[in-house]
Amino acid sequence: MTAYAIPRGVLAVCARLREKGHRAWIVGGCVRDLLRSAKVSDWDIATSARPEEVQRAFRRVIPTGIQHGTVTVHHEGESYEVTTLRGETTYSDGRRPDSVVFVDDITADLARRDFTVNAIALEPLDAHIIDPFDGQKDLERRVLRAVGSAFDRFSEDGLRALRAARFVAALDFDLDPATAAAIRPTLDTFRKVSAERVRDEWLKALKARAPSRAFEVMREHGLLEVSAPELLPQVGCDQNKWHRYDVWGHAMACVDAAAGDSVLRLSALLHDIGKPKTRAFSEKTQDYTFYEHERLGAEMVEPILARLRFSNDERERVTHLVRHHLVCYDGTWTDAAVRRWIRRIGKERLEDLYALNEADIRGKDRDAAADLAPLVELKSRVADILARGEALTTRDLAIGGRELMQQLGMKPSPKMGMLLERLLEDVLEDPSRNDPALLLARAAELLPTLPETKARQA
């Protein structure tokens, strides 16, 4: 009997169910990952016991999804989802079955699942594998194949097509041709999937070693036409001599090269979205230009992310990175220019931008070491400025609003903020000016030159 690394708590839950006269299996992704020697994050247990029988078998049970046969068992300090074997009826909403029917046959339960590699069950107490759809062979071949008819599976639940794209990247598998061919004919069902579920699948796909594999499936089979058609003009949009790929190909190389979390990699995916609309041929350089594509790109990204229900923080982070991803540093920058650049980017966004810029460079498929040299130099200069603690925001000035009110008789107003910004400009140019006496003298000099501002309406 083959030994599998199954947690003691899982074995205990299954043993308890057997004691009560029921059968139990681990199923789904945990079996898939166990068989491929990958890390298992969640253990799902299927049982012949009805939900009320599971409740009677354990002291602490929460009916988390009891209408669909699922309860959460708390046992020995851990929580496990235990689901009664079930079949399903029609899917009117293209997402969830209209009703479920409890069954006694594990094969019938596995038949309702999405892909063969997720339709394997294992009896953990005796290590017996039930694999009616040859999922183990597909694991060996590294192929993602639908259970039964792919058209039927994708017509039932529109999210399954997007999960196929995600699994291609997450598992580093190839998509079975017949399964792939069923995606486009079932796009009407995919259109019923909520924006939140699309967002979640994107974020999961972006954790893969090569997220491009998921987004290539989405592009090729029509999923992006439904969820994010704004990305498609990048396909076939030629770039200039600095790039090997078209805009789409570069985005794919960039997202794979990006070292960071899913939101940073989302920024890599979207960073050049403004290029197709700004592409122009320059007679002077005899090459293509994309003037202000970063500004337009930021404007385009915001509504896409809002539509896909990304959080306000995620939208702000991605939009900011797309707006500032073009780093045109060279050694002629003065220290004042570097300080102004830090202020514009924000100290809290520097590491993100470094990672995105490096991915952008590596995604051009050129001599990365040479092209990265300016970024390395910029990072060094920024680190020196930060280490010296030089003023980069009005909060870093040696005086603030209280001193302006006490010494110049000012009142809180937009004019005060304007004055502090002018003082910061002086200090960014020359940090030695960040002295209380010098700043107050300069403030008195600047104050008469500032325009009057209207009082805010109550």
Image (cartoon, rainbow, N blue to C red):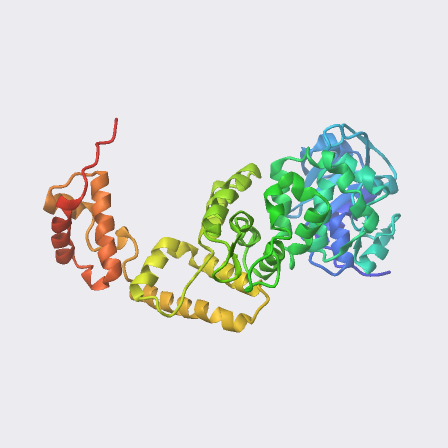
Q: Nearer the viewer, residue 231 or 349?
A: 231
On the picture, is 154 further left or further right than 206?
right
Residue 432, above or below 14: below
Q: Position of residue 5 (x, y in %)?
A: 75, 59
Residue 443, above or below 109: below
Q: Nearer the viewer, residue 8 or 389?
A: 389
Residue 47 sits in quarter: top right
Residue 373, above or below 46: below
Is residue 121 in sight in this rendering? no
Q: Position of residue 67 (x, y in %)?
A: 72, 29
On the picture, is 296 further left or further right than 89?
left
Residue 112 sits in quarter: top right
Q: Nearer the viewer, residue 138 or 337?
A: 337
Residue 338 sits in quarter: bottom left
Which quarter of the image is occupied by the N terminus?
bottom right
On the picture, is 303 further left or further right than 395?
right
Is residue 433 in sight in this rendering? yes
Which quarter of the image is occupied by the C terminus?
top left
Judged from this view, the residue extending furthest toward the front is: 283
- Residue drawn at x 76%, y 42% as measured from the top left: 183
- Residue drawn at x 22%, y 51% as measured from the top left: 422
Q: Position of residue 22 (x, y in %)?
A: 83, 40
